[in-house]
Amino acid sequence: MITISELREEILKNDNYLLMGHIEPDGDCIGSLFALKWYLDKLNKSALVLLSAPPEDKYQILGISNNDFMTFSDYDFSKKKYHNCIILDSGDLERLGDGKEFTAECYIINIDHHIDNPAFGNINYIDPGKAAVGEIIYDLIKLDNNHLLNKKIAAAISTAIIADTGGFRYQNTTAEVFSIMAEMMSLGVDIYNINRAVFAATKYSSVLLKAKALLTLALHGNGKIAYMEVNKKMLQEAEAEEKEASGLVNYARDITGVEVGLVFTEIEENKTKVSLRSNSYCPVNEIAAYFGGGGHLRAAGCIINMNIKQSQEAVLRKVEEYV
Ligand SMILES: [Mn+2]
């Protein structure tokens, strides 16, 4: 792998960057995209963050302006072509969703921390030892001897790290993470309110969906596997969007004695999204990969072309082999 200094050299070689991350962007994705964008601004490099939709309201705390990004629908591909693209936090190119087409003729710099990233870029900087891509952006910015790091960039880096460490609760929380966060706080970043924005600000529809999903909670494999489902009817009744089901898997994983938590979400009648989380030993990224997905050792996902019940049977059988 190239070094962080070599990564910086590569980035400095070009200008006019398209910055993209995975669809349904989480805090690491949003935080690292805008931290990198504002850093490139300071280097007098032009960069556009391209998103499938405007950032969720909770990220308003970062002070993202409408000039900082564009969405797929308002981006006129025929008018301005980008030749250089930096892709963040995306385990593979498919994670860009419809955004993949915008990268077709681009020279791609791929910056990520997913262990199973196939190095799809022309330049790849993949470090699974980093808790968040935000940590890699921090390392990059630090090469410029501090003077480019300001409170706004620090808040974006903090959001990335807080999101991907689950507020410093996951196994990826290292001494390095705390040392970065101490520095971010000394720059005046409001950690309390970022934490609240990322984890505590919950919509009524999300809570209603949680109530419905929890009623389906079941144990399997001598209590080592806990799973629940989210179907279309529940989404409709709660007036919730599918992405609001994303945090539910933690409730399954956090049950005493459980090693693997699973949520099965109905996308279409014969298309089911599976979220997998583990606590201490099960490599859920292997299980997700078996079904065509991927992720991290303790957090992974896949989409299976079967209905919810069939998907449950297939995945539970596979997880049993591990617990
Ligand atoms: Mn991430």
Image: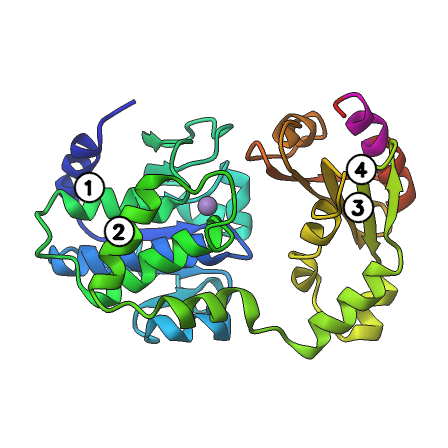
The amino acid at mark 3 is Lys
Gap between marks 1 and 2, in whole Å? Answer: 9 Å
Q: Position of residue 71 (x, y in %)?
A: 45, 65
Q: Residue at x 88, y 60 (%)?
A: 215
Please give the range of residues in magenta: 315-321
The kind of residue on which mark 2 rests is Tyr
**CA neighbours of label 4 inside 10 A, class few (<14), some (14 to 19), many (20+):** many
Residue labelled with disc 4: 225
Q: Main secondary structure of the magenta part?
A: helix
Q: What SS does tag 2 mark?
A: strand
Q: Residues within 10 Å of mark 3 (few under 14, many from 20)?
A: some
Residue depicted at x 76% and y 38%: 257
Q: Position of residue 36 (x, y in %)?
A: 27, 54
Q: Please identify the quadrant where the C terminus is shown.
A: top right
Q: Is residue 201 above or below residue 199?
A: below
Q: Position of residue 309 (x, y in %)?
A: 91, 43
Callouts 1 and 2 close, C-beta under 8 Å: yes
Label 2 Cα neighbours within 10 Å, binned few <14 / some 14-19 / many ≥20 = many
Q: Is residue 87 on the magenta stretch?
A: no
Residue wearing tag 3:
271
**Contact between labelled residues 2 and 3, with CB atoms less than 8 Å apart:** no
Q: Nearer the viewer, mark 1 or mark 2?
A: 1
Q: Earlier in the sequence, mark 3 or mark 1?
A: 1
Q: Which residue is mark 1?
A: 11
Nearer-N-terminus badge (3/2): 2
